[in-house]
Amino acid sequence: MKRVFVGLSGGVDSSVAALLLKQQGYEVTGVYMKNWSQDLPGMKCPWKEDYQDAKRLAVQLAIDFKLYDFETEYRQRVVDYMVREYKAGRTPNPDIMCNQEVKFKLFLETALENGADLIATGHYARVEHARANSSQLTAHSSRLLRAKDTDKDQTYFLYRISKSALSKVLFPLGGLTKKEVREIAKKHGLISAGRKESMGICFVGNVGIKEFLSQYINEKPGKIVDQNGKIIGEHEGAAFYTIGQRHGLSIGGGLPYYVTGKNMEKNEVYVTVDLQDKKLWKRQIKLTDAHWLDKPNGKLSVRTRHRASLIPVKKLDLSSNLTAAIELEEEVRALTPGQSAVLYSGNKVLGGGIVV
């Protein structure tokens, strides 16, 4: 019997994932990852409540339960990275980095050291394992596929998982819709059945990015400049603004303004009232720090943010394994440096990189 350690957060998705694995005959252990415990002004970190919920679910499911404390590593590998990127004027995705460094690296390594054969999470994604024989999974031969529930599909956040890690991962919810998951939870009386989805930064809680960053970045007010070069207002710190942003600009009257760019050295934020402004639309994407699960070939499409439409790729230039240039069939709005662009071939996730 294979031993599977499941990341158990206290929510409905991870608890149903654990339930399904147990029904499939795996020896299941629930693991709560303590990645953050710091309270922030106006927001109490919910980790204790989440931990207690996860522990109660483990009792309800009659599975073993462990607590892994990754707080130091999470701060170093995810939070410090996020703060550095924002200070540099980019807009990183902490959830992608958390998956790369914590859930599918640190958690996996620790679980294997503790006797697990595989790990699992409640992500909406599918993984297809090739087999060398009837009993052994082969490293580097597993494929990451989009979930059945296209609205909940989370493969955009998972493209940086290593190929060797992917061979040790199970995604029990990949073939289910969110509605079906909730129905399973209700049918089995799980205490997580009616729990609302968590929002905000991965593991930190329901806190806005600006409020979170304010604890680490001492930004100075600066000029907001429109498409004609006219100073029309004052921003609260250039690091807090991102391309395409409309809300939170505090510019009164008239048409809404959209952020088109910023200059960190001059501490200026640039905006426009023209939604067709060329600075808001791009047909070319340059990627750095690329990560590939499979060789890109055939008919390709790209996603530039979670739940965004898949855009057909006209041309792909892989000058090296770490960089790529993508020409799109149509323009994409608000392409943002620091975010990720993920390439797909049908339902298969090929990989991607960080937008330059």
Image: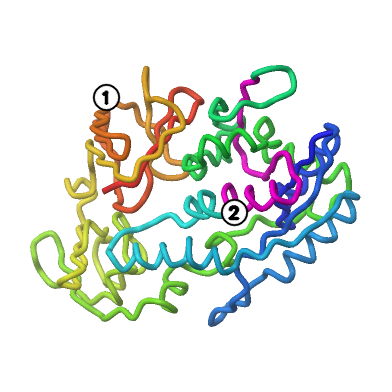
Q: Position of residue 335 (x, y in %)?
A: 29, 47
Residue 178, compared with residue 263, is above or below; it is above
Q: Which amino acid does the dot numbered 2 rest on?
A: Leu
Q: Position of residue 107 (x, y in %)?
A: 63, 52
Circle 2 crowding by C-alpha within 10 Å: few under 14, some 14–19, many from 20? some
**Which image quadrant: the N terminus?**
top right
Residue 78: image location, x then y, percent: 48, 61
Amino acid type, mark 1: Lys
Q: Residue at x 13, y 72 (%)?
A: 231
Question: Magenta segment: does it hold 122?
Answer: yes
**In this figure, which residue is indicated by the disc labeled 1?**
314
* Residue at far left of view: 229
**Residue count near mark 1 (Cα–Cα under 10 Å), binned few <14, some 14–19, many ≥20:** some
Q: Is residue 69 left or right of residue 320?
A: right
Q: Is tag 1's residue or tag 2's residue first in the polypeptide sequence?
A: 2
Instruction: Give the structural element (helix, strand or loop) at label 1.
Output: strand
State how the image is colored. rainbow
> Can you tell which mark lies on residue 190?
none
- What is the span of residues highlighted in magenta in the rendered image? 103-131
How many numbered markers are drawn?
2
Residue 272 percent coordinates (x, y): 20, 58
Residue bearing mark 2:
106
Q: Quadrant of residue 82?
A: bottom left
In the displayed structure, would residue 244 be above or below residue 287? below
On screen, residue 313 versus residue 154, left or right, reads left
Q: Secondary structure at mark 2?
A: helix
Give the residue at x 81% y 44%. 28
How far apart marks 1 and 2 lie (CA) works out to 37 Å
